Amino acid sequence: MVYDVIIIGAGPAGLTAGIYAKRAMMNTVLIEKVGIGGQIMKTHKIENYPGYPQISGIELMQKMEEHAKKFDVETTFSEVLEIKDRGDVKTIITSDNEIETRTVIIATGTSPRRLGVPGEANFTGKGVSTCATCDGFFFRGKDVALIGGGDSAIVEAIFLTKMVNKVYVIHRRDELRAEMINQKRAFDNPKIEFVWNSNVQSIEGNDMVQKITVKNKITEEVTQLDVSGVFMYVGVDPNTGFINADKDNSGFLKTSPDLSTSIPGIFAAGDCRVTLLRQVATAVGDGALAAVSAQRYIGTLSN
Ligand SMILES: Cc1cc2nc3c(=O)[nH]c(=O)nc-3n(C[C@H](O)[C@H](O)[C@H](O)COP(=O)(O)OP(=O)(O)OC[C@H]3O[C@@H](n4cnc5c(N)ncnc54)[C@H](O)[C@@H]3O)c2cc1C
């Protein structure tokens, strides 16, 4: 059997592509390696997705999943390891099997980047986390550090103040990149202390994290902070290692206005592609466009 479209990744982009593909009567399957929902499941509060002035990531994705189920989007759970381009038919090699399809929509998003400092890998799950929403509860009443200065970092730092005693926000620059409304909330929050122009050098402890060493880039002063948790928000890397289409230097897939990649019949949607804004609103727009583009591409094939 040859599918019309295989969508890889069940985050906002992939689920939206699934809804559009099924409503276009395309023979569709969605392949997901972890669980339905994607990265947005990691946040407790979304305030910028139209129609929902405030909603949690889990709740929003439950709604999207229900919506996809209503249109019978078939989902299978395995990891896509490779795509073989055989012209009009592509073979998707997963951790479980091989599947054939006329078109592919890559909606695999990104993964949190690692700092690569000593102690980070050893203490992952023992105080080092990339998800304040998932793990913040374990640090109630304690002091923690959060590394980063983007929007996700600042929103999650504010969230942590609801349960921890203090959050050190350690940022390598002297200003934040977060939305202004979130910057103001963070500056007004007495539980947040900013450590500017600084890099984390190491994470230390016994069984669990106990302290971090931080170096100021300007003064070169080295200080130690006693913290029980370290939350990493230092950027993301695209999940695109399994596909050999054109990418930028960071590995994000390059796309044309119709979201086609450099390989005919393979499209990319959402955070995994080169784009100015990586958000739910842009990911769902991409999912819709990629599905329509895949449908039009199939119309150009001979059979
Ligand atoms: C903490 C945090 C807070 C955020 N807050 C907001 C916010 O308030 N508002 C907002 O609009 N956006 C927010 N974002 C950004 C938002 O989460 C993303 O823009 C959005 O999830 C992108 O959707 P996506 O479908 O492109 O990718 P993802 O959501 O990353 O989904 C990709 C899916 O693909 C799967 N996958 C990856 N590789 C493979 C493979 N090889 N085989 C099979 N499956 C694979 C993954 O498991 C994942 O489920 C936040 C992100 C984070 C981390």
Image (spheres, rainbow, N blue to C red):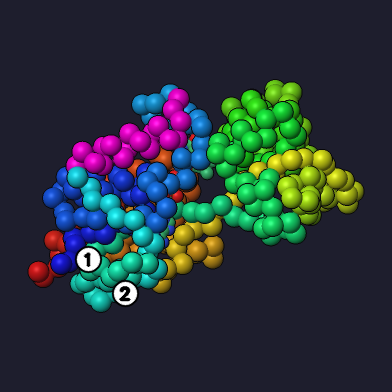
Indicate the position of residue 188 as horizontal and vertical percent values.
70, 22
User: Can you identify the residue that label 1 sits on?
Assistant: 101
Say which residue appears at 35% left-offset and 49% top-offset. Answer: 10
Q: In this view, does 200 lie to the left or right of 303?
A: right
Indicate the position of residue 243 as horizontal and vertical percent values.
40, 69
Q: Quadrant of the C terminus?
A: bottom left
* Label 1 neighbour load within 10 Å: few <14, some 14-19, many 20+: many
Instruction: Tell whether circle 2 marks a residue whose Cβ is less than 8 angstroms from ligand 1.
Output: no
Indicate the position of residue 290 as horizontal and vertical percent values.
29, 53
- Quarter of the rendering containing residue 99: bottom left
- Residue stretch in magenta: 54-71
Q: Which residue lies furthest to the bottom in this view?
A: 86
Q: Are marks 1 and 2 in contact (CB under 8 Å)?
A: no
Determine the main secondary structure of the stretch shown in magenta.
Answer: helix
Tell me how far mark 1 sits from mark 2, CA to CA. 10 Å
Say which residue appears at 87% left-offset and 46% top-offset. Answer: 223
User: Can you identify the residue that label 2 sits on?
Assistant: 84
Indicate which disc, 1 or 2, sits on the residue closer to the N terminus: 2
Which amino acid, mark 1? Answer: Thr
